[in-house]
Image (cartoon, rainbow, N blue to C red):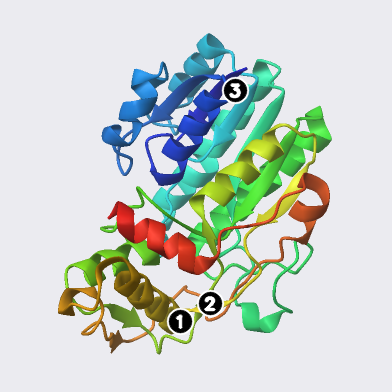
Amino acid sequence: MRTLVTGGAGFIGSHLTDALLARGDEVTVIDNLSSGKRENLDGALAAGAELIEGDIVDREFVERVVREVGPSTIFHLAAQGEVRRSIDHPSLDATVNVVGTVNLIEAGKEIGLDRFVFASTGGAIYGEGSRIDLPAVESAPLAPLCPYGQSKLAGEQYLELYRRMYMFNSVSLRFGNVYGPRQNPKGEAGAVAIFGELLLEGKRPVVFGDGTQTRDFVYIDDLIEAVLTASRTDVEGAINIGSGVETSLLELLDGLREAGHSLNGDGPSHGSAFEPTFESARPGEVKRIAIDPGRAAEELGWNATTPLEEGLRRTLQSL
């Protein structure tokens, strides 16, 4: 199968590229390398993947690449993915996440694409979890609290529109908080990588808020299996890809501390001084969220299987 991965030099995209190559696909990656790293693709490029540098907001570029590659499936992961940045620069967020997505959908339609797999968000699209029953099901009312969540919702709605207008085959996967090797500890997103690096450096983590805010953490290997499975089906619409479990940031810090002990002993740089400092909560971030993976289990036969403690241990080993 010939496949196209946008954002393929990023954390999730590079793992997906490796997995597609492993199943025998011819893989082309589009990435502008604004947040992705070429070194994430070193193994994939050596194994035959192609990297084309460019920006998804450039309609002519997107149309040309999609036409030349002729993929049967597009995996669309390229995005502006930071909540804080979306609040500070909403026009940028909308340009990348809405215009860029529409460019890819339209280009896919023009070549008669078989399948479009869209990386949406389960962490931001539902809004504040305390206003709905958790874990959130796909039919829960959607009320994003930040432009990032709103732009991802717009992407889903464009896919719904193209499904009605053109019978365009697509699925929107609402990712939980994905973590694992290759996640960038320097960005805003990626609490596990950020806190994990601080743990290994013997530094204190900074928690915005009181630390009781919850997230739904899903390990990268589990998520990639869900993406691959979804690409092989004709299941359409939104599907949550998460654990269904609320984990507070304080619980996450405890888990990292324990993982550090199990890997490296109890030295001071591995957890004994790993106590957080607290700063004011940041606007646009939800207090509670967990997403129900029931539809993924029923229609994809998928469940997250990596326990958090094991995933944290693997992530620390990679750091």
Instruction: Classify 305 as above or below 35.
Output: below
Could you tell me which secondary element the residue under label 3 belongs to? helix
CA neighbours of label 2 inside 10 A, class few (<14), some (14 to 19), many (20+): some
The residue type indicated by label 2 comes to Thr
Instruction: Classify 110 as above or below 266.
Output: above
Residue position marked by numbered label 2 in the rendering: 247
Q: How many marks?
A: 3
Quarter of image, res 162: top right
Q: Specify the farthest residue to the top.
A: 68
Residue position marked by numbered label 1 in the rendering: 251
Which residue is pictured at 54% across the width and 18% down the height? 66
Which residue is pictured at 42% across the width and 84% down the height? 250
Which residue is pictured at 54% across the width and 44% down the height? 98
The residue type indicated by label 3 comes to Ala
Distance of mark 3 from mark 1, alpha carbons?
A: 44 Å
Residue position marked by numbered label 3 in the rendering: 107
Q: Horizontal placement of 280 versus 284: left or right?
A: left
Distance of mark 2 from mark 1, alpha carbons?
A: 6 Å
Q: Residue 59: x and y, percent?
A: 48, 25
Q: Do tag 2 and tag 1 residues touch (Cβ < 8 Å)?
A: yes
In which quadrant is the N terminus drawn?
top right
Instruction: Classify 311 as above or below 270.
Output: above
Could you tell me which secondary element the residue under label 2 belongs to? strand
The residue type indicated by label 1 comes to Glu
Quarter of image, res 297: bottom right
Q: Earlier in the sequence, mark 3 or mark 1?
A: 3
Q: Residue 5: x and y, percent?
A: 50, 30
Q: Horizontal placement of 134 versus 225: left or right?
A: right
Distance of mark 3 from mark 2, alpha carbons?
A: 39 Å
